[in-house]
């Protein structure tokens, strides 16, 4: 939907933590009213309603995603299916009802459980500062197809994780971020990405005591990643007696429990390297 310059300027003044939601709501309400171009009038009307009744807008959880599915060429592993499963699970678990029961006083956005997906390590959706963070991954491997020594993979790798030997590419999996770029540029197919899945990071947040999410070693297929999410949601509901955030409750000991519980589910060997094996 098109926006006038004034409307764009006005939406930028909405507090950042609700800006995306207000913008979405402005467009929904404009569409319902049959408006094609959003003007200052639409922004002011929706913003006033939204900010005055903020408690009604708290959904209990947020699931955010990057634009990988919109045709981003960097996508290492799409996550739409997993996103849908996670959203359905959070609905089934009635996180909003859970929070209404547990939180004393008004519900606020900061009470919500936050999940974010990024379809490659560029992490445009900033998932590392969410409670649960899922990042798409493609593990590069060499095939039997001869290498033409074109060097495209070496140039494409921002991590300097690919070098060329006389017999073909050599991958340094200690450096590799499993982004799949080297596979995407290898025209002959010497480099292949047969194992695609997700990195899972847990317990990130911003606020007064920020922390980056901790990464569970390994790459997980959709089923295993979903099982980790389910485990975390169950943990959260068991521990959050007063509506405390997951990331507040989730200690390093809890993280190690997850690591032990799911280490056999990784598509790759779990060791010092993220994607060894
Ligand atoms: S995180 Fe990666 S796949 Fe998603 S929009 Fe950013 S660059 Fe594209
Ligand atoms: S998958 Fe690994 S080796 Fe290939 S480009 Fe990405 S970081 Fe480099
Ligand atoms: S891009 Fe493929 S063909 Fe070219 S040097 Fe790398 S592995 Fe060899």
Image: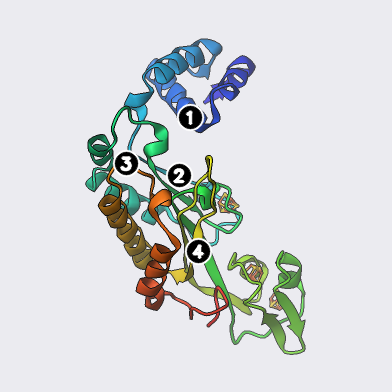
Residue that label 4 marks: 215
Distance from the alpha carbon under mark 4 to that under mark 3: 24 Å
Residue 243's disc number: 3
Query: Upstream in the sequence, badge 4 or badge 3?
Result: 4
Q: Report crowding for label 1: few under 14, some 14 to 19, many 20 or more residues within 10 A (C-alpha).
A: some
Image spot of residue 22 (x, y percent):
46, 25
* Residue depicted at 38% across the width and 56% down the height: 82
Residue 105's disc number: none
- Asked whether mark 2 lies closer than 8 Å to ligand 1, one says no
60 shown above or below 235: above
Distance from the alpha carbon under mark 2 to that under mark 1: 13 Å
Residue that label 1 marks: 18
Distance from the alpha carbon under mark 3 to that under mark 2: 21 Å
Query: Upstream in the sequence, badge 4 or badge 2?
Result: 2
Distance from the alpha carbon under mark 1 to that under mark 4: 27 Å
149 shown above or below 217: below
* Residue depicted at 62% across the width and 70% down the height: 183
Pick out the residue farthest to the bottom: 167
Please state which of the two labelled residues, at mark 4 or mark 3, is closer to the viewer. 3
């Amino acid at each position: 939907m098109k926006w006038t310059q004034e409307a764009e300027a006005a939406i930028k003044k909405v507090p950042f933590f609700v800006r995306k939601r207000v913008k979405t709501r402005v467009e929904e309400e404009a569409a319902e009213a049959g408006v094609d171009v959003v003007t200052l009038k639409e922004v002011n009307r929706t913003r006033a309603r939204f900010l005055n009744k903020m408690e009604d807008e708290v959904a209990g959880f947020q699931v955010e995603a990057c634009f990988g599915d919109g045709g981003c060429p960097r996508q290492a592993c799409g996550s739409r299916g997993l996103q849908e499963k996670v959203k359905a699970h959070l609905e089934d678990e009635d996180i909003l009802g859970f929070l209404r029961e547990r939180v004393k006083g008004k519900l606020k956005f900061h009470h919500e459980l936050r999940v974010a997906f990024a379809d490659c390590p560029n992490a445009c959706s900033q998932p590392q500062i969410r409670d649960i963070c899922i990042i798409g991954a493609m593990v590069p491997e060499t095939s039997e197809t001869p290498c033409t020594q074109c060097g495209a993979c070496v140039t494409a790798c921002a991590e300097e994780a690919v070098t060329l030997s006389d017999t073909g590419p050599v991958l340094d999996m200690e450096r590799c971020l499993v982004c799949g770029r080297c596979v995407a540029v290898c025209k002959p197919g010497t480099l292949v990405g047969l194992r695609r899945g997700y990195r899972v990071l847990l317990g990130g947040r911003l606020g007064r005591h920020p922390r980056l999410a901790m990464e569970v070693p390994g790459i997980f297929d959709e089923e295993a990643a979903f099982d980790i999410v389910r485990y975390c949601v169950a943990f959260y509901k068991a521990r959050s007696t007063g509506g405390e955030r997951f990331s507040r409750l989730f200690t390093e000991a809890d993280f190690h429990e997850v690591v032990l519980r799911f280490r056999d589910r990784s598509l790759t060997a779990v060791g010092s390297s993220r994607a060894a094996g």
